[in-house]
Image (cartoon, rainbow, N blue to C red):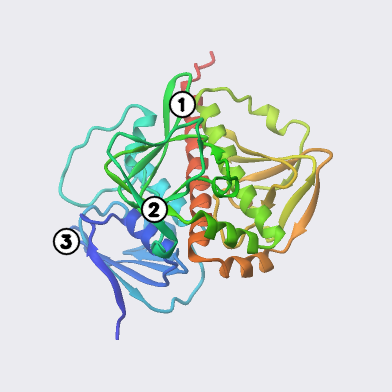
Amino acid sequence: MNNFVLAGNLNFLSLGDILQLLGSNASTGVLRITSKYAQDLGLIYFFNGNPVNASVGSLAGLDAVNSLFGWLDGDFEFIEEKVAGENVIKKSRMQIILDCLRMLDDGQIEQLGPVTFTKKSSHPLDKLSNLPIIRGPLIDYTYVVDEEEVQAGNKIVIEGKHGGWLWVILEGTAEIIRETPRGPLKLLRIGEGAFIGSIASFLLLEGSVRSAAIMAVNNVLLGVLDSRRLSVDFLRMSNQFRNLAISLDRRLKQVTNMAVDMNLNNIKVEEFINGKKQVIAQGENVESLFTITEGEAHVGRNTESGYVPLANLYPGDFFGHVPFLDMGQEPYSASVFGSKDLKISEMGPDILGQEYNQLSSTFKNFMEHLATCILVTSMLVCEFRKNAENKKPEKF
């Protein structure tokens, strides 16, 4: 008997939203998609929330997934079942979503559905409205101690102010915004299940300085999380895992700063890799995870537009392969360069993975949310780099 757990219409829930929903709940099974505008059946196979293979007509793997993003009208159903076979698709679900939305915007994916005409955005920052809303998995309401409502257009968080609260969005959508000399810069959109605040928010009694503003796009209902309970969860972790969590928090701030600087064209790319040795090459099959004990390291992605800096790492930070989190950076999507005095210590990814699986669902969801924000912001930095390259005057 088929175990149907999700069904609906693509007019109501887009393929990008479906991928996020299945991913956040670590679903394993097959997504079946049909459309009156297509002769073939579309199939996407998931294992632990990640697309591992797909087919539609003569297309397979990533090509099939890309094609299915062009299906604007159709019905879908997800069946929970064991999925066997090779892991053909190597990209993470969020990278797939963002790449496909970009290709749709650029007209590289054929659209199947009612004929519509939409005005294409001429300004790169206007594309924020087309980005997927970063949502989290099911909310554990046992960690919610109060609720607050913020009206559309009002700020939930003010950049530069101190704050000690940690929230989860129960309803609505918000935008993360950084103030720059050129005006507000919109970075991310977040929705139900996404978190607002940082690890420092509930570790420091006096609160931490907010590094960005968060604005309610529509009416937003927030769940105030139990900071004392989260602090207890944090203190129960091993020292190594606590350092990993804190470093993950710092990396999001790093890549956010890079996005702002890249948008302002304040970055001299060569300064980040000159005099540094390559420790991990982009795309290298690395299974190890390291923490920096001395020196510094730099994370950057090689793109068609050239090298794109993503983060600077210092003693206490980690780099390498984190098997239970996808940040969209090293080793598969970025390289790591180390200073001459770089010294590192190897961490135990398997032991950390076991500890991760034993975390409360709320803390686990919080760390996954940080990783997803790092991934999406990394892609935004690359987009800003591409835009900067396209604006350069031609050489004669």
Where is mark 1, residue-wise? 179
Where is mark 3, residue-wise? 36
Residue visible at 15% across and 49% down in the picture: 114
Where is mark 2, residue-wise? 135
Mark nearer the viewer, 1 or 3:
1
Query: Is residue 394 in sight in this rendering?
Result: yes
Residue visible at 42% across and 46% down in the picture: 99
Residue visible at 44% across and 52% down in the picture: 94
Q: Furthest residue to the right?
A: 341
User: Quick one: label 1 or label 3, which is nearer the N terminus?
Assistant: 3
Distance, label 2 to label 3, CA atoms, is 30 Å
Mark 3 crowd level (few <14, some 14–19, many ≥20, 10 Å Cα): few
Please state the horizontal and vertical placement of residue 275, each as a whole percent of the image.
78, 32
Residue type of the residue flagged with mark 3: Lys
Instruction: State left or right for residue 22 relative to residue 86.
Output: left
Please state the horizontal and vertical placement of residue 195, each as a whole percent of the image.
44, 50
